[in-house]
């Protein structure tokens, strides 16, 4: 991907409303975990609805390199696992591409397998710090050698007799929590993780689905998760719902383009992932969930949305874990809302694909929106129709790129992005889908 030429795009305000019913790709978080847990289970797991984006395909390639058998069966994926502790040393470096989730979760798995491995990624991922997973995982007995600043490439010597970890997260992070739990699968005894705020619980749900013993209890405002080590995970089929983080982009576009009416079907509605939907409703959004159901242990429903004149919102820091990937597109919604919005406590955005706090502010400024950063807060001064007209540097960040293209559907002058190549890491076919709805996205 790094050797391909940049793919700039321009987004213009469409002449007609966005209309249609769509399905978004499978949930990225669940797709990563389905492949990993399937590889650690005994037997064959069938995965339907797997996100076939670049990030998830990197996870599939890594698990194959570690000894799991992963094949396609029509639209489904089949994973024949090795059992807990049964992975084998890779013959080559594990290249995780642009996927921070895959890199951090896999670090947990490798920390408690008694062999050496090396992990790297693309230019963006090699800039992202790994220290917050390395530090707690050292307690298992694993040894890590990283570049300065705890960055990839990373050499991991897994523990011979892995120890269970007891750790309190200093900052709520589903990735760090999951890495510790994955390490705990191959350690004797009880692994405990305490999180200060509840974060997405796909790992806990899937561990239970595959037969592990997991206890979750309240701990102040957060939760304490206890995992009994060395279970025998049994293969279990997984149906992956639509990714709510991907649904956010057409959803916000539908709110911003006058006359629009959209249905986004089969979206995952895990209550620890729906902060954006709650926030948009607070802004007055005409957003309704219909056909609610439970699918493979996860809540699923169809989102109906219509154009709405939005008002500003004050988003509390406690909501951040439930919508951490949606802040760039929420910022677009707030740039087009009446009043001044404030997003509080966004320190976690500084360690995403880019410094997403700074790059989100830069995106809005490129559209002539007044925006300020105060500490870890983002303040957005909205208007009904921002001027637009700027070029957004995406910094190899797929969510920033998609947010800017949604922004261009609402600004008076077009918005341009410098590179759209990385959108496929999470949302293959995004531009085609948006054009089908009526969005105006073209090569400049």
Image (cartoon, helix red, strand yellow):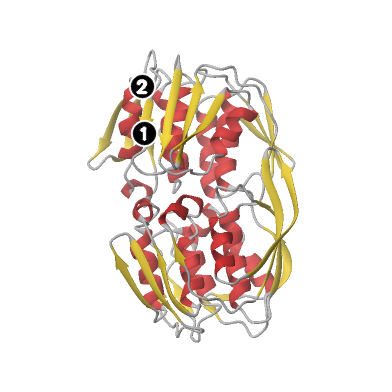
Residue at the spot 39% in from the left edge and 82% down from the top edge: 368
Secondary structure of the residue carrying tag 2 is: helix
Residue at the spot 43% in from the left edge and 83% down from the top edge: 389
In the image, residue 434 lies at what x, y percent?
63, 69
Q: Name the residue under label 1.
A: 168
Question: Does the image show residue 371?
Answer: yes
Residue 250 placement, left or right of 180: right
**Residue 231 falls in image quadrant:** top right
In the image, residue 378 lies at what x, y percent?
36, 66
Tell me if residue 249 comes above or below residue 307 in the rendering.
Answer: above
Check the image and name the residue furthest to the right. Answer: 291
Question: Does the image show residue 392?
Answer: no
Q: Name the residue under label 2.
A: 140
Q: Tell which of 285 and 15 is nearer to you.
A: 285
Tell me if residue 325 comes above or below residue 381 in the rendering.
Answer: above
Residue 158 placement, left or right of 29: left
Earlier sequence position, callout 2 versus callout 1: 2
Secondary structure of the residue carrying tag 1 is: strand
């Amino acid at each position: 991907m790094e050797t391909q030429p940049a793919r700039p795009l321009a987004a213009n305000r469409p002449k007609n409303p966005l209309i249609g019913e769509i399905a978004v790709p499978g949930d990225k978080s669940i797709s990563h975990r389905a492949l990993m847990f399937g590889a650690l289970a005994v037997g064959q797991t069938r995965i339907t609805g797997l996100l076939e984006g670049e990030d998830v395909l990197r996870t599939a390639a890594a698990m194959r390199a570690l000894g799991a058998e992963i094949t396609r069966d029509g639209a489904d994926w089949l994973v024949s696992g090795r059992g807990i502790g049964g992975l084998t040393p890779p013959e080559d470096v594990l290249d995780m591409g642009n996927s921070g989730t895959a890199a951090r979760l896999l670090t947990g798995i490798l920390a408690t397998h008694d062999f050496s491995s090396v992990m790297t990624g693309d230019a963006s991922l090699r800039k992202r710090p790994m220290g917050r997973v390395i530090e707690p995982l050292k307690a298992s007995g694993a040894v890590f050698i990283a570049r300065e600043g705890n960055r990839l490439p990373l050499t991991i010597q897994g523990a011979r007799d892995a120890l269970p970890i007891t750790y309190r997260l200093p900052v709520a992070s589903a990735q760090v929590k999951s890495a510790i739990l994955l390490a705990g699968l191959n350690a004797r005894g009880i692994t405990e993780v305490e999180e200060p705020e509840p974060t997405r619980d796909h790992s806990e749900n899937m561990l239970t689905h595959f037969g592990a013993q997991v206890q979750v209890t309240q701990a102040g405002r957060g939760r304490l998760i206890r995992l009994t080590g060395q279970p025998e995970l049994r293969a279990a089929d997984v149906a992956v719902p639509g990714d709510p983080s991907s649904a956010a982009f057409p959803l916000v576009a539908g709110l911003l383009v006058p006359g629009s009416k959209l249905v986004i079907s089969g979206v995952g509605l895990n209550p620890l992932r729906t902060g954006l939907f709650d926030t948009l409703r607070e802004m007055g959004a005409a957003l309704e969930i219909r056909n609610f159901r439970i699918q493979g242990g996860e809540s699923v429903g169809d989102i109906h949305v219509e154009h709405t004149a939005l008002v500003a919102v004050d988003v509390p820091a406690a909501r951040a874990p439930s919508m951490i990937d949606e802040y760039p597109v929420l910022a677009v919604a707030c740039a087009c809302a009446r009043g001044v919005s404030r997003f509080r406590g966004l320190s976690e955005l500084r360690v995403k694909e880019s410094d997403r706090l700074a790059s989100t502010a830069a995106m809005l400024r490129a559209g002539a929106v007044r925006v300020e950063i105060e500490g870890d807060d983002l303040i957005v001064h909205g208007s009904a129709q921002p001027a637009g007209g700027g070029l957004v540097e995406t910094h190899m960040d797929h969510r920033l790129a998609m947010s800017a293209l949604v922004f261009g559907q609402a600004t008076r002058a077009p918005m341009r992005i410098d590179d759209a190549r990385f959108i496929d890491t999470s949302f293959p076919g995004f531009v085609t889908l948006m054009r089908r709805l009526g969005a105006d996205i073209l090569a400049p």
